Image (cartoon, grey):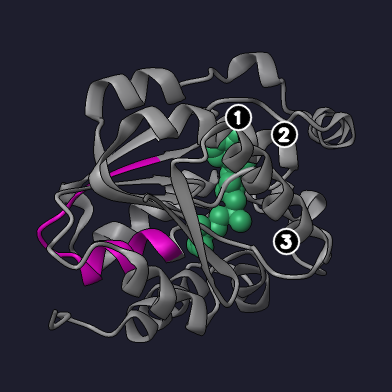
């Protein structure tokens, strides 16, 4: 399939725009798709123009822009809690000396999608997908930051009911094993025939181990799926 833009160019467009909006470039790059990841993500999507794509975990919109620009005919549905952007710095393993960005992550997603001209094809939902910070340490960091998690809803089941089934799903949200398992169990009922679930951060580092363990626990319950891995990305599809 001939793409309208290369995934790496689309990623670069998003990152440059976000840097112009005042976000630290390294901070954005650290928690978003790397150049090779962007290529593999697009390669893993069904090439017969996926009609509907669900993205779970947008951060500030780099992967949303890549998918939105590379698949110009697809309807896009995104889910993210939309927490204050500065909070992400506290939750990540690597910390940056950056201002405490108060704008929500979803406000940057909206701005980036508008900037590249694809906002009209996106439905953006604010909330947690299938679970809300299963890790007690994360919950404490969020509370210390001043965020009350009771203000946020679990919206995955309703979003899936309303918009599923999906031809491609990009799961890049909470990387703890139990969250990955919980998200996959929900998503498994909403994949179109020949659809795929693509996971980020399947490498050898701490988060990679957490995500891969979640995927393996899922495969024990759903042996009808098979897993293909390339670089830091994994693809699940029905055998
Ligand atoms: C690694 S970042 C996503 C990066 C993004 N996909 C990219 O490549 O540009 C993870 C995102 O998942 C979100 N998140 C965390 N827990 C979540 C949950 N339970 N449901 C949905 N999103 C969640 C975080 O707010 C954060 O924005």
Is 105 above or below relative to 48? above
Location of residue 152 in the rendering, given as x and y in whole percent from the top left corner: 57, 20
Residue 65 counted in the magenta span: yes
First in sequence: mark 2 vs mark 3 = 2
> Where residue 161 sits: x, y (%)?
29, 20
Q: Is mark 2 within 8 Å of ligand 1?
A: no
- How far, Cα to Cα, is label 2 from label 3? 13 Å
Mark 2 lies on residue: 178
Q: Are marks 2 and 1 in contact (CB under 8 Å)?
A: yes
Which residue is identified by label 3?
Answer: 208
Question: How many numbered marks does the figure carry?
Answer: 3
Q: CA distance from mark 3 to mark 1?
A: 17 Å
Contact, mark 3 vs mark 1 (Cβ under 8 Å):
no
Q: Estimate how packed mark 3 is, as few (under 14), some (14 to 19) or many (20 or more) residues with alpha carbons within 10 Å.
A: some
Secondary structure beneath label 3: helix
Asked whether 105 falls inside the magenta stretch, the response is no
Viewer-closest of 144 and 194: 194
Q: Which residues are magenta?
A: 63-78
Quadrant assignment, res 113: bottom left
Q: Label 1 belongs to which residue?
A: 182
Of residues 87 and 203, the one drawn nearer to the viewer in this rendering = 203
Name the residue rendered at 76%, 51% in the picture: 210
Q: CA distance from mark 2 to mark 1?
A: 6 Å
């Amino acid at each position: 399939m001939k793409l309208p833009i290369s995934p790496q160019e689309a990623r670069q467009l998003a990152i440059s725009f976000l840097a112009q909006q005042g976000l630290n470039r390294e901070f954005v790059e650290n928690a978003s798709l790397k150049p090779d990841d962007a290529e593999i993500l697009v390669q893993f999507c069904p090439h017969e123009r996926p009609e509907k794509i669900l993205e779970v975990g947008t951060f500030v919109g780099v992967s949303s822009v890549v998918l939105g620009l590379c698949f110009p005919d697809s309807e896009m549905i995104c889910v993210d809690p939309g927490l204050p952007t500065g909070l992400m710095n506290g939750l990540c393993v690597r910390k940056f000396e950056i201002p405490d960005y108060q704008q929500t992550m979803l406000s940057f997603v909206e701005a980036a999608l508008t900037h590249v001209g694809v906002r009209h094809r996106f439905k953006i939902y604010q909330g947690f997908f299938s679970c809300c910070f299963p890790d007690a340490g994360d919950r404490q960091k969020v509370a210390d930051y001043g965020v009350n998690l009771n203000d946020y809803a679990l919206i995955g089941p309703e979003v899936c009911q309303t918009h599923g089934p999906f031809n491609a799903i990009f799961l890049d949200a909470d990387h703890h094993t139990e969250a990955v398992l919980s998200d996959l169990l929900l998503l498994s009922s909403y994949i179109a025939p020949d659809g795929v679930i693509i996971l980020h951060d399947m490498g050898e580092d701490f988060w990679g181990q957490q995500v891969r363990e979640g995927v393996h626990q899922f495969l024990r319950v759903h042996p009808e799926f098979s897993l293909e891995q390339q670089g830091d990305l994994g693809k699940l599809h029905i055998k």
